[in-house]
Image (cartoon, coloured by chain):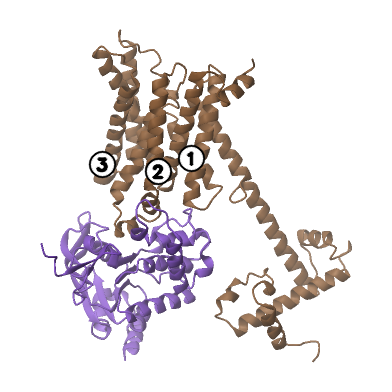
């Protein structure tokens, strides 16, 4: 049997990488998720090209987080097809890192900052072995990248909201993935954290990685991202920020919920 | 011999072969319960485990009826354990089904399953009392635990199953920890959350069914929950929490079983639970990390530092101090006299506090976004944060009100 030409097994890491780097990091067709009988996301198609940074934008309850969870199979799909690097998620897990909302976990959990980051190395450490010095060094390196190296031994409950968010990002960095999916990484964080996270994400993009963020702050979309996906249950717009993030598409997405002044402000930002 | 002497004999395993066997078996059960309970606690599933422990009763009773009807000894332990495991598993499935498929919450499902299964079990026990065969005497020992008349084979069975549970805890600690902390992230790195949860409840089930004989089904949930909450007072790390929890569970069960062997008429389960509770109370009071005494002391020390600092700054600005706690602290340190006038030491300390405050203010104005200066809390001296060279440089930039 000749090996599948699309797939190359990297023996020392024991994981599958796609050699066909031209294939899209994330491609979604007809994604539909429903809670009960009310669809939260309805038939959304989207492509997230390689080395891009996309903001998923939309009003509260528009299904942004649900869309992200749907792609990863965290919530069951009613319909739709999701491909990561041309393959189902199960085959390329190691290349995808997910950063959930900070509020989704109990921060009084008995763990130190370094313990949480080492959780990102789960696939390497394996099921039964203890994390060794090499893993600890890698985890420290990831903490360093988000400016949290001095906090490695702190109990996670003692951190500020922004610091917690940076620990979550460090855990994703430890996975050394090709695609990073982040759920509201800037929600409720301080200015220093926002700055630190943006520069890490921009560096990832510069290194050829792909970044997708659920994002709620319309005023920073243009400064931080190069692509936008506007969702309000259905897809309202998709493309480069210049094409997709316009006063018209925003009006369509948010309906009457955006004030004229906000629209004007964004128009100025675009000009 | 007094009870105390008997207790010491039992603790040191000198109270006879059978008693020693039971004590060691109980210790192992406690280790397994503490280890498994750590995950039940971290995953916040204490109530679910309460439901499955109560759901064992109809299984015990039905197994007895079947074995007696087949003409055997209704009290054969492996048969009873098998029956209890089956009915507890059914209880667990029903709870999960109700929570997932109906609009009822998990709490309602737990309440319904717990009471219905337990009620059914009690009815079946009553039926058994009227049966003529099967040696039913002592079956109600499964409610509150009883070690008198325990057979050596039974103790070995309990010890062996306890060992299996401990091995499972060691093997599954990483995925269980990750699922307990962040199930969504765990799912994305390839951990099967449902199967991990199932394995965890399976562990709780093993502990429950092997604990039936010693602790009894009503109280076994205490042995799953009290040790981990006891351990939580002593550590902020999962791996240590599991070890301490297993140790606390083992210690409570071992000494509880020994005490119960010494004081003949006391049921084993309640004694073990009370020993576990004693460890909990000690930890609650005395732990230096999260104990009540330690946090009260920490709070007092912090309050004193705040009052001292406020008092010194007020003295430096020449303001009158009215707060009685502040006055008392300053007086006790010899910084003010009884009539409230500053002593020489007091004036010196006030000057230093004022200088420190000025240094902080200047540093924070000059380097507003330096993360080091985020450590300003009004109490930490700036010398702790900056090097002496940096402080010297800072002093050269300070405004000099006296000289102008």
Residue at the image point whose x is 46% and y is 21% from the top: B147
The answer for which chain carries disc 3 is B
User: Which residue is under mark 1?
Assistant: B246
Q: Residues within 10 Å of mark 2 (few under 14, many from 20)?
A: many
Left or right: where does residue B315 sit relative to residue B38?
A: right
User: Which residue is under mark 3?
Assistant: B97
Could you tell me residue B78's position as x and y percent? 32, 24
Q: Describe the element under mark 2 as helix, strand or loop.
A: helix
Q: Residues within 10 Å of mark 1 (few under 14, many from 20)?
A: many
Could you tell me residue B62's position as x and y percent? 28, 21
Q: Quadrant of the C terminus of chain A?
A: bottom left
Residue A59 shows in this picture: no
Same-subunit check for callouts 2 and 1: yes
Mark pair 2, 1: CA separation: 10 Å
Q: Describe the element under mark 3 as helix, strand or loop.
A: helix
User: Which residue is under mark 2?
Assistant: B169
Residue at the image point whose x is 41% and y is 79% from the top: A199
> Which chain is tinted purple?
A
């Amino acid at each position: 049997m000749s090996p599948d030409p699309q797939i190359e097994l990297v023996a020392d890491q024991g994981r599958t990488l796609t050699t066909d780097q031209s294939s899209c990091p994330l491609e979604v067709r007809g994604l539909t998720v429903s809670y009960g009988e009310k669809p939260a996301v309805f038939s959304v198609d989207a492509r997230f090209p390689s080395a891009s940074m996309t903001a998923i934008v939309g009003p509260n309850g528009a299904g942004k987080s649900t869309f992200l969870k749907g792609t990863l199979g965290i919530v069951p799909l009613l319909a739709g097809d999701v491909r990561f690097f041309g393959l189902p998620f199960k085959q390329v897990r190691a290349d995808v890192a997910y950063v959930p909302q900070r509020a989704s976990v109990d921060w009084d959990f008995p763990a130190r900052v370094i313990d949480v980051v080492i959780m990102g190395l789960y696939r390497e450490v394996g099921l039964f072995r203890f994390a060794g010095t090499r893993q600890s060094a890698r985890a420290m390196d990831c903490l360093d990248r988000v400016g949290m190296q001095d906090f490695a031994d702190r109990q996670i409950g003692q951190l500020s909201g922004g610091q917690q968010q940076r620990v979550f990002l460090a855990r994703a960095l430890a996975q050394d993935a090709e695609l990073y999916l982040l759920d509201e990484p800037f929600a409720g964080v301080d200015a220093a954290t926002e700055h630190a996270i943006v520069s890490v994400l921009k560096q990832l993009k510069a290194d050829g990685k792909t970044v997708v963020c659920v994002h709620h702050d319309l005023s920073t979309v243009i400064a931080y991202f190069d692509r936008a996906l506007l969702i309000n249950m259905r897809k309202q717009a998709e493309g480069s920020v210049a094409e997709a993030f316009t006063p018209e598409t925003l009006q369509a997405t948010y309906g009457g919920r955006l004030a004229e002044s906000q629209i004007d402000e964004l128009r100025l930002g675009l000009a | 011999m007094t009870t105390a002497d008997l207790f010491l004999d039992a603790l040191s395993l000198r109270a006879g072969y059978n008693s020693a066997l039971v004590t060691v078996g109980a210790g192992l059960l406690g280790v397994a319960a503490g280890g498994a309970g750590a995950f039940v606690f971290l995953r916040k599933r204490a109530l679910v485990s309460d439901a499955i422990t109560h759901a064992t009763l109809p299984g015990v009773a039905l197994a007895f009826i079947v074995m007696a009807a087949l003409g055997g000894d209704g009290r054969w332990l492996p048969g009873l354990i098998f029956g209890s495991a089956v009915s507890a598993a059914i209880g667990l499935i029903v709870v999960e089904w109700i929570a997932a498929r109906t609009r009822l919450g998990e709490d309602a499902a737990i309440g319904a399953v717990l009471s219905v299964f337990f009620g059914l079990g009690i009815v079946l026990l009553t039926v058994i009392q009227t049966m003529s065969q099967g040696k039913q005497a002592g079956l109600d020992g499964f409610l509150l635990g009883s070690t008198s008349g325990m057979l050596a084979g039974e103790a070995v069975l309990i010890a062996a199953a306890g060992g299996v549970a401990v091995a499972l805890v060691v093997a599954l600690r990483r995925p269980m920890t990750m699922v307990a902390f962040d199930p969504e992230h765990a799912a994305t790195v390839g951990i099967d959350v449902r199967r991990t949860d199932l394995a965890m409840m399976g562990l709780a089930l093993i502990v429950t069914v092997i604990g039936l004989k010693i602790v009894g089904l009503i109280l076994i949930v205490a042995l799953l929950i009290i040790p981990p909450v006891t351990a939580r007072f002593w550590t902020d790390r999962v791996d240590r929490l599991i070890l301490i929890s297993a140790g606390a569970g083992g210690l409570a069960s071992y000494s509880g079983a020994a005490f119960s062997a010494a004081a003949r008429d006391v049921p084993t389960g309640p004694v073990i639970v009370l020993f576990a509770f004693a460890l909990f109370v000690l930890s609650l009071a005395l732990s230096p990390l999260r104990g009540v005494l330690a946090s009260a002391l920490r709070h007092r020390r912090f309050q004193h530092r705040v009052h001292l600092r406020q008092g010194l700054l007020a003295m430096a600005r020449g303001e009158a101090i009215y707060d009685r706690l502040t006055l008392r602290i300053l007086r006790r340190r010899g910084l003010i006299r009884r009539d409230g006038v500053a002593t020489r030491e007091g004036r010196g300390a006030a000057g230093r506090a004022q200088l420190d405050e000025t240094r902080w203010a200047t540093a924070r104005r000059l380097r507003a976004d330096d993360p080091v200066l985020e450590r300003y809390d009004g109490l930490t001296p700036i010398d702790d944060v900056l090097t002496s060279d940096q402080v010297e440089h800072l002093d050269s930039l300070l405004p000099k009100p006296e000289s102008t």
